[in-house]
Image (spheres, rainbow, N blue to C red):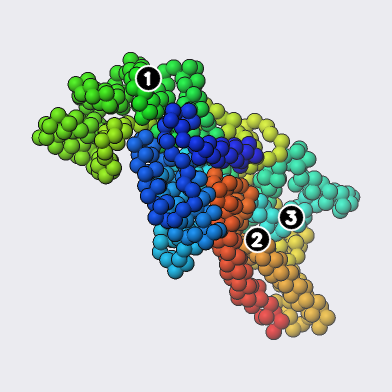
Amino acid sequence: MSSSHVLTMISKSFARLALAAFIAGVFCPEPQAGIYDTGIVLPQPAQAKELEIFLAAVNQKKMDCGIRNFEPYSLMLVKQAQEAVKRHEYDAAKVLSNYACLLSPDIPPVYSAQAAAQWHANKLDVPAVAQSLFAAYVKTLSPMNIEDFSMVVFENAAVLAGSILLAFCTIALVLLLAYFSLLYHDVRHSIPAALPDFSVWAMVITLFVLPLVCRLSIIWFCAWSLVLLYAYATRYERFVIRGSFALLILAVPLLAAAMGFAKCVSQDEIINLLWKANYGYCDLRDTQRLEKYLDRFPLDEDVLLSLGLLFKKEGGFSSSQKYYERILDKNPRNYKAAINLGNVHFAQNNWQAAIACYNQAVEMAPSKTAAAHFNLSRIYQSKFMFNESEEALNKAKNIDLSRVSSYLKDISDNFNRLIIDETVDISQIWVRGFNLFMATPAYTRDVWRSAVGGRYFPYDLFVLLALALFAVNIPDKDQVRIAVRCKLCGMVLCRRCQRSASDDLVCAHCQTLLQKQSSLGYGVREDKKNRIKSYITRKRITAVALGYVFPGAGHFYAGQTFIGTAGMLVFFMLVLKTIMPLVFEGPWSFLLGPRSIACAAYGAMLLLYWCLMAVHMRKIQDKSSEENLLLRIVS
């Protein structure tokens, strides 16, 4: 995540606190702080029963104002609940946190605060605490919360992309350890013997570090190394190399795009204002920003609908009607504008005009107008037309039972609660963010550059694809490279150096030891046995060391290719999930503090996973075929 995104989230957090502090200041008889005249003040420290009575009235006022999530007030209640916990006033803390959940049922921090209050009040009430924490987790994963969900998408995409890149680099490191000497051997054969060995070493090292010399990143160095070593890899290692290139070329760019999309949506001002207007709380400054945006884009239906909704809830019916009529002038088939225009007429007791608007909406979209039928039933009930009211209500239930049932629970005589207002769908807000993201490729490009690093040049993905295709289409490896390694002593050999090498890739000395062990002198036999033992011990130590440093890498080096690759991916995912809460602040860190619980949980999982992989690595080495072969030779 870029520093600008973190700064944006911090600035939003301070803005929320400043807004909440303003609301807490005084009771304003006129709507000066925002589009809603809430007439609400913060509760002073009091007994739990007094707080409950006071906050129940606040909740009723919030619903009368048509506010779905009274976010700033809820955050201040969370703050007061935390202070109550410090004073050991646990009952008051529970009341404050419970009403924070009622006032803003869609945002995660209120449920986290509720869980904290429940825990301090009664540490044995584990089910209630778990239920609140689960609710907070579910709300974080809900697309309803643009900022939280964007953070989740960004973090998890970053973890997956980082895991793939780190595993890609680790595979290159393991193959370098295994096959670098073989490549040197072949290069040595292709260069005149008069050239000293150190010159050949310098040439081979320069060949490998060529991407770094060209100011490219470590990713390019690893990709280039895998291409150079591809001919020496085993069959299963080749499968992994091809899969690694496929993930690098296909998955990482898609994950970078997901990160760019999340960054774009969370940082766009209009998207956040649309969410606040339809699902949260808008103050006067937010409304003015929407109107200023409308001056530049006068035909934006989402903004027009949102402004009409804001003014209608405040009682500015003439302004609200103006915005809805502008929508219908542009798009006569917009059923949401027709329904909301009918609501404006309904609030002014202009029932015939309201009925006309509702019927017009039903004609536009018969399967989507549960709100129109519900509102018609309210009008018919007010006119004592009870049969028609029941018929309209049943039609509304047939179209959208859950929505109608939720409105019936909180219905009252207030015009903001008596009828259903249509809002901009949350899916439409996400689509709007996606369209903005597609029109701004810089977001993905910046993330890709940050992931790959190094010097930028265009069409880098195509260069990676060309490298992968080149490696995959290398002819038979015996025609490209001739160096092999003795399976017993690890000696680098080839048919030029040792024509008597067997088809089992055993050098002539080891072959002689196996076939004519009794005829060899004691010194020669012991020297060869010590070489074999030294090679196998060195190989085991390398595998164990790799397994301890990068769980899964030791398995890969020891020949368990697929288990090792999966193990490395899981290890790097756990490492990054542990680090993320320490590096990046969450949207609510200003209120809830650092995400130490998440960090500790993933850290514990990482430690357990490391121990399991280390134990499994030792078991593999204890049962290795090399050790059994060594015992056979020594015996």
Query: The residue under label 3 is which amino acid type?
Result: Phe
Q: Which residue carries the number 2 mark?
A: 550
Instruction: Give the CA separation, mark 2 to mark 1.
Output: 64 Å
Tag 2's secondary structure? loop
Q: Position of residue 194 (x, y in %)?
A: 89, 50
Which of these two is toward me, 291 or 312?
Answer: 312
Name the kind of residue labelled 1 in the image. Ser
Which label sits in the foreground, 2 or 3? 2
Q: Is residue 259 left or right of residue 525?
A: left
Would residue 60 be seen by someone viewing this image from the given angle? yes
Label 2 crowding class (10 Å Cα cut-off): few <14, some 14-19, many 20+? many
- 192 sits to left or right of 401: right
Is residue 461 visible in the rendered image? The answer is: no
Q: Secondary structure at mark 1?
A: helix
Q: Quadrant of residue 38?
A: top left
Nearer-N-terminus badge (1/3): 3
Foreground label between 2 and 1: 1
Q: Give the residue displayed 44% in from the left and 56% down from the top.
A: 47
Question: Residue 313 occupies which quadrant of the picture?
Answer: top left
Residues 281 and 349: in front is 349
The image position of residue 428, as x and y in percent, is 40, 32
Residue at the spot of label 1: 319
